[in-house]
Image (spheres, coloured by chain):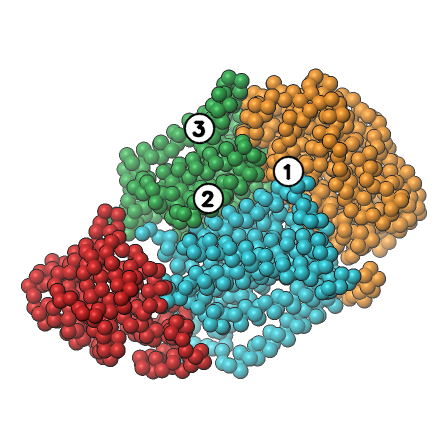
Chain colours: A green, B red, C cyan, D orange
Amino acid sequence: MDLVVIIILQVIAAVASLALVSVGLAVIFGMMRVINLAHGEFIMLGGYAVIYATRWGVNLWVAMLLVAPLFVGVVGIVVERTVIRFLYGRMIDTMLATWGLSLLLIGAATMIFGNTTTGVSAPLGSVTIGQYQTSLYELVLVVIVVAVLGGLMAILRLTKAGLIARATMQNPAMAASLGISTNTVYMVTFGAGAALSGLAGALIAPLSGVLPTMGVAYVAKAFITVISGGSAIIAGTLSASMLLGSLNTLATFVATPVVGEITLLFAAIVLLRILPQGITGRFFRRAL
Amino acid sequence: MTPIADPIIETRGLVMRFGGVEVLRGIDFGIAAGELRCLVGPNGAGKSTFFKCLTGQLKPSAGEIRFKNASIGGLPSMDIARRGIGIKTQVPSLYDGLSAREHVWLAVKRRVATVGGLRKEVPSLVDQVMEDMQITPLANRLVGQLAHGQRQIVELAMVTAAEPDLILLDEPAAGMTHEEVERLAELVLRLRGTRSLIVVEHDMQFIRMIARTVTVLHQGQVLMEDDAETVLRDQRVRDVYLGKREVA
Amino acid sequence: MTAPLKAVGWVAGLALSVAAVFGLPHVLELFTLINATIYVSMAILTLSLALIWGYGGILCFGQAAFFGLGGYTYAICAINFGDSTWAIVLAMVLPALVAALVGYFIFWGRIGDVYLGVITLTMTLIFLKFFNATAGDAYKIGRAALGGFNGIPSTPPLNLPWDVGTQLAPEDIWYIAASLLVILYAGSRWLLTTAFGRVVVSIRENEKRSELLGYDVRRYKLGIFTIGGAIAGMAGILFANCVFVSPTMFSLFYNAQVIIWVTVGGLGTLLGPIAGSIALQMIVAKLGTLQGLDPNVVLGAILIVFVLLVPKGLQPVLQDWWDRLREPRQPAMPAPAPASTLRSAGIERPLTSATTAHQPAANAASRP
Amino acid sequence: MDTKLDRRRILKAAAVGTAAAAGPWFIRDLHAADDIKIAGIHDASGGLDIYGRPMIDVLTLAVEEANAAGGLLGRQLTLINYDPQSNIQYYTQYATEAATKEKVAVVLAGITSASREAIRPVLKRFNTLYFYNTQYEGGVCDRNCFCTGSTPAQTVEKLIPYAMKKFNGKKIYVLAADYNYGQITSKWVKKFTQENGGTIVQTDFFPLDVTDFGPTIKKIQAAKPDIVVSVLVGGSHISFYRQWAATGMKKQIPMASTTFGVGNEHVVTNPEEHNGILAAYAYFQEVKSPANADYIKRYQKRFGEKAAPLTELAMMTYHGFNLWAAAVKKAGTVDRMKVIEALEGNMSFTGPGGKTTIDPATHHAVLDVYLAEAQNRQFKVLESFSQQKPADTAAVCDLKKNPNENQQYVIDVKV
């Protein structure tokens, strides 16, 4: 019985972490049709932001929830102003440019931080469930992910900024004719997506450590999750994370981590073959 | 509506829905072999959607499409094209990076592959079509560089070069100069008889030049079908058009 | 270009390549020659992507999968048969078969642009993860242990056909690799002039139109994709002969590199990507020798700069310059101020395939 | 084929075209014409640089010291350090370059087994002596190659019984990196566990890029072993130690490792994440001996107080170089066969890591092995075992009988 509970918790944690590492990419893809292949490096920068902020005496939670998203958000805005904005409507070109950016950031991080895994210890200790123990931090992480997705939903649905963003997303030309500066919307959206990636990196740092090349492990997974999810930002990310995350974890439990990974990848291929527009291309089409 | 004895193409109760919106609401339509039919109607009447259903670009939600006595509704575009339907789309659908001659070559090559024929005849057949359509001077120009009217002609040349039994022309005269429109009408009239044609057009002068029978679509349904002069004089048709746009 | 000039160009190109193939071994030291052979094998891989992406319009994020499969098939077969002759054949056939299968899955499923990218990327990642996990004893094919992360270090070199005793020296492998590159380049150029090649290009230009003409676009895409798989497999064989096979052949890095080379060389051209790949490999290797500068920084910067400033890639831009040099503008036009008008004049030129190739993807991706 | 290559090399013009000139990253001291050239190929960048940098530093210092002491056979040494950027492809390229262009007397190179297997055939083909100085899974049998690092029969054999006794446990759960080293070493762990009356509950293998150990930790909890043995490798796997401590499991189940510390894991993690982890190697920086204390002083003087901590990999590179130098002195030449014969005469060297002797039958080393416990970012040496023989490789390889052998045996561990 305990084992069932613990497996369910593990699955939830896996789904949450997959959603966490994907949501930044999903925001940028869903709103702007830009696939940001430097997403993994934004995660990496978030991780380093936490490491350095805590070294300089900032409280860990402040560093994770504030410093890292802000820092990476600013980086995102700079990237949007200097590179991305020249490439709107050229999806493949943006992918290539962000791929270049990804290599550039990996190289730069290696030169600055060195190619050594650094990290911070996970806070909060552990909790006991029957005969099992699990890290309390992992559970808190789930709560944070739920809060982030909920907050994102609330912003898009309830605020004026959200309305403007949704309008621009639906019909950029119309939004522009209504006096909305699509330029600004895109800039802010890219910054927000980057900030979410930074947040993801910050929250992952205590679990996986921080390394200049750490993004590579996440970008492919996030990319696959977002595309499998389809164009709806929150519903897409969530549904794809649930499907792929639970398959991955269950297969890992039953067999090995490699089987888990391969199961995830196969599931994505089959999914895209059946639903070429992703899950929300077919279901939950009205969702965000 | 007059039922046609031996229609080359015929639709019965054709319905096309997008989500909750019904764009085609049960269209019954047919033309005889060798006929030239004009299809008119205001924007949003469903003309282009109708063409897309006929050419397999859209899969109808309900209803039947029969072409040469076979049901073709929902077949892939490629199959329908091989059965003998050619289309010139509303926005010219061309290969901007290829020359005009290559366009015609692609069409002729496909026809030779379907119908059978000697491969080595292809180049001379291509030359002949270029000649017929009076676009030989454009042969080696990249189509992406041509003026709009020239592009329309190249597309028409390509479509006719495939020698389909039924040709669908979606606003062929749009963006053409007066001389070009006349030349176009001449070409269309030459095709009549050997080919069946359905032409969507707003240009009433052009319609007068070419058409006998005109079908009017309105809000996804056939509003009326009669000879050109009757239709153009009809008050309902005028209302329908004036509600949306001026009759050109 | 006029016909005689074109012929002169072909003859000159042929003479130059023959000179390079047979001359280099006499000028270069052995280690440089082996490096050159590696570059050539990667250039062949680049050629395969230049063909399917630049002319077929298929942006495959996993071209290295066929490269890796070719290498592995060669190594496994050569170890088991002892003779490399059939290993070579199989190492071309198997990647082609896998490409055909994947292509069938993709093209008959009507999966386009970015989704196609995801699926091909996922495919390589599966191979990467699989081959990385084959260190155990269970993973032995005949006498060949797959070796997991370590790969198969003892990949046997090529021997003369059906003559196991005569193993080829590095110089001989250079001759094979370099001539193969020349042959494959010429073969690809020829392929594009055939009816098949012209239809493939038409599909890249406007897939819907080709369908409306009655072409089964799926088959043509499958055809070019399969050919690309076979060429990538050949590159894998050569690479296995210069280095050895290991799962890194499937890695994101190799996939990324190939795409970068094609972009830099010029999408929709063949010579550009080949030259681009060789030049960039030399640059990166050179950079590896500099202390304190990470090669990734340079590679990344090159890619960004090219996408932003030279989106057409090197070959089309150089060709523009060359054309302009040879055929100065008509006198009716105001005298051009060379430097500043070059770029804008470049835009006036026909939409080259490099720019148009991007359009279907961009359109398909735009909102419905 | 060899003669053909030689002839070509002589015929070839010295001119190097600009094409494909992948030059090395040189650290050249002096170069007179009669210098003895030697090469090091270790990763100074990329994912493996954490292992490679101390090896490069140690080798550089060793050559500098040898030159300061008058060189070898009256000639100065020139060290060429190549950086293969953690890319296997460059290993073969640089090995070829060192052998054919620079014609070095010896190559000290390689970290992963993959890199060694990339280099070994190249150097064998071009008749260039090769030293591999890394702890590895054992089994290489090649007369041209000397392996001075420790192998499982030397370290795991001590580590497992010690851990079982110390932690008073019989049930062991093994986590291993999914490649040759992990696969083979985990077999040795099983063998020594069973020989000491224990059982292996489960062995899990992890690709080198896995960072999420959540499900595994839950599986371990369900299996309730007495001891966890880690054969995990590389930066990504460090996250296991963090996640293990974060779930509070570290306080409940003790751990021994065949790899912890070699990649400075004990410096990167926190004391609460690593205190008490057992490890056994042929060298720890904390080994107490006058030779070691003196060496560390020289090392830190040359590279600064904050120089990378010395690991077995680095120290065995030092021993490897000195073994070669001693053999050259004994042979009176750098000629490859004469040096090999000198090394096969039970050549030995006593240095900071204790005494290292070449075993002529296997070309592996008889070494002193130390058992230690991680303690506040350092290791506390608990016990030492002198002159351990490479029994694993010796079981499959006898170069005295079969001098023409050339392969890596996968040792068939009877379990």
Give the residue displayed 77% in from the left and 35% down from the top: D151
Tags 2 and 3 on a common chain: yes
Mark 1 belongs to chain: D
Identified by mark 2, the residue type is: Ala
Residue B2: image quadrant is bottom left
Q: Is residue A99 left or right of residue D42?
A: left
Measure the alpha-carbon separation of dots 1 and 2.
24 Å
Task: Tell me which numbered mark, 2 or 3, is placed earlier along the sequence.
Answer: 3
Q: Are marks 2 and 3 in contact (CB under 8 Å)?
A: no
A22 vs A93, nearest the viewer:
A22
Pointer 2 local density, CA inside 10 Å: few below 14, some 14–19, many at least 20: many
Give the residue displayed 73% in from the left and 45% down from the top: D116
A146 vs D378, nearest the viewer:
A146
Q: Which residue is mark 1?
A: D178
Q: Which residue is mark 3?
A: A142
Identified by mark 3, the residue type is: Val
Give the residue displayed 66% in from the left and 41% down from the top: C138
Image mark for residue A268: 2
